[in-house]
Amino acid sequence: MLAKIRRMYFREKLSIREISSRCNMARNTVRRWLREPEMSEPQYAERQSESIVDPYIEQLRQWIQADTHRPKRDRRTAKAMFEAIKAQGFTGSYVLLAVHVRKLQVEIKNAPLRKAFVPLAFAHGEAFQFDWSCEYAWIGGLRRRIEVAHCKLASSRAFWLVAYYTQSHEMLFDAHTRSFEAFGGIPRRGIYDNMKTAVDKVHKGKKRSVNARFEAMCGHYLFEPDFCNVASGWEKGIVEKNVQDRRRQIWIEASTMRWTSLAELNIWLAERCRNAWDTLRHPQWQIMTVGEVLQDERLQLMPMPKPFDGYVEQPVRVSSTSLIHFMRSRYSVPTPYAHRVVSLHIYPDLLVLVADGREIARHPRSFERYQTIYNWQHYIPLIGQKPGALRNGAPFATMPEALQSLQRHLLKHPGGDRVMAQVLSVIPIHGLEAVLVAVEIALESGRPSGEHVLNVLGRLKGPPPQENILSIPLVLQEEPEANVSRYEQLRSSSEIDNVK
């Protein structure tokens, strides 16, 4: 409702009175919501399923649909489906499940194999369509499965592709931001299927329980989401065909190439999309290319606002080794936050950790499993108390080469670990760059020591020269004289008579 009110006020330029009448809400409520500085996530009440089988209906439909392409001996029985969803947490009876399975089998069996469709036409700036596809590419020497986001304008047929490793919320938000920036604006409506990152629950008809974060993004970009009916992909046939066409064109070439990273692949995809705009003819206006029609449609698009901060937040607990766990990998956190619960902001390529309202750490996101990503500076406060951990400390294996060379020299002498801990303790004070310069100068001497490093650092960070301020005393050119008779001259004659 909040997103709907924002669209009517900021985009359709309706008055508060008209919005209040259409939404059947008090004008003070509408006015208070519009005064909010940004789109806040609405709170949904806990959903109540009408039947205990409803959360598993889509899973059962997929199984039955898949079994229609298998021999009869390989098809799953209702008993097998019951045992499968029972392992997922289903607590109902077998009879109840069998009734729903029988209804789904009859529904799928009676569905016509071929259907007739009505051709659709869209005005400039009216709508875009969004979908995902699964592709494969060689990235980093491995053949990886990637999820490709397809966003296509329904009128000009301009499309944009972005590759990710997953279809999670942060990827969905980033794909919209990149697509809108490439198109040069935002249409009034977005057409989707019932993907789990956008729809929490499919109700009867067109009613949907929309995900809170997805609704916040729609309210930020001021477009209205429109969801297709279940198993009705033809309602967004433009982007469905785009998936097939790009698979036959772009991905045939991409499958023969090698990429060092996903970012390099996305740069190549962006170039191919723009080249396609200039070469492909528009299906309705054959004398014009897609890029030329896009220039006309941009006049009807809403200008791109500030990008949506599309992160996903979740609480994580910091372990005793100052690590947090995320997607089977571990990331370091400053040691003062050990055993605490901090907030993890998840971006498509970045992880940001926040505690007490401020950022405490950030790491590039790794999609490999069982990886440990350290920032050795997070462990400096603890090394002052436990200098012996420097010798075999795993995080300190990632220090710059100059610091590792100094450590090797110092550990050859008794108490070298404590001296090295003193050198590392000045990094938060003077900065890493200054300490590295001091360490390199000390190493050039041939016999580096902690005192030498601290001495060089003190000279590099010495106090600035004081300015010589000349103090010149003020001298009066004409000093005042004590003359009481001047006061008598100021008095009038009447005042003098009264005194007498």
Image (tube, grey):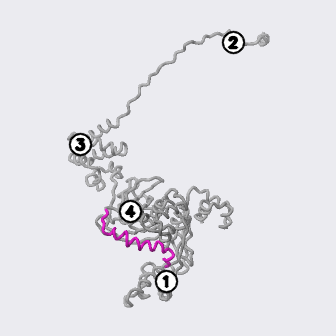
Relative to 181, is 338 on the left or the right? left
For label 4, the SS is helix
Q: Measure how far apart labels 2 and 4 are at the Cα level.
A: 92 Å
Can residue 313 be seen by looking at this rendering?
no
Q: Measure how far apart labels 1 and 2 are at the Cα level.
A: 111 Å
- Eye-nearest disc, 2 or 4: 4
User: Mark 4 packing: few (<14 Cα in 10 Å), some, or many (20+)?
Assistant: some
Q: Measure how far apart labels 3 and 1 are at the Cα level.
A: 73 Å
- Eye-nearest disc, 3 or 2: 3
Q: Which residue is mark 1?
A: 92
Residue 258 pos. (x, y %): 30, 65
The circle on residue 487 is 2
Relative to 27, is 145 on the left or the right? left
Kind of residue at disc 3: Leu
Q: Measure how far apart labels 4 and 3 are at the Cα level.
A: 43 Å
Relative to 437, is 315 on the left or the right? right
Residue 455 pos. (x, y %): 29, 37
Q: Which residue is mark 4?
A: 266
In terms of sequence position, does the residue under pointer 2 or pointer 4 come before the other?
Answer: 4
Q: Which residue is mark 3?
A: 443
Kind of residue at disc 2: Tyr
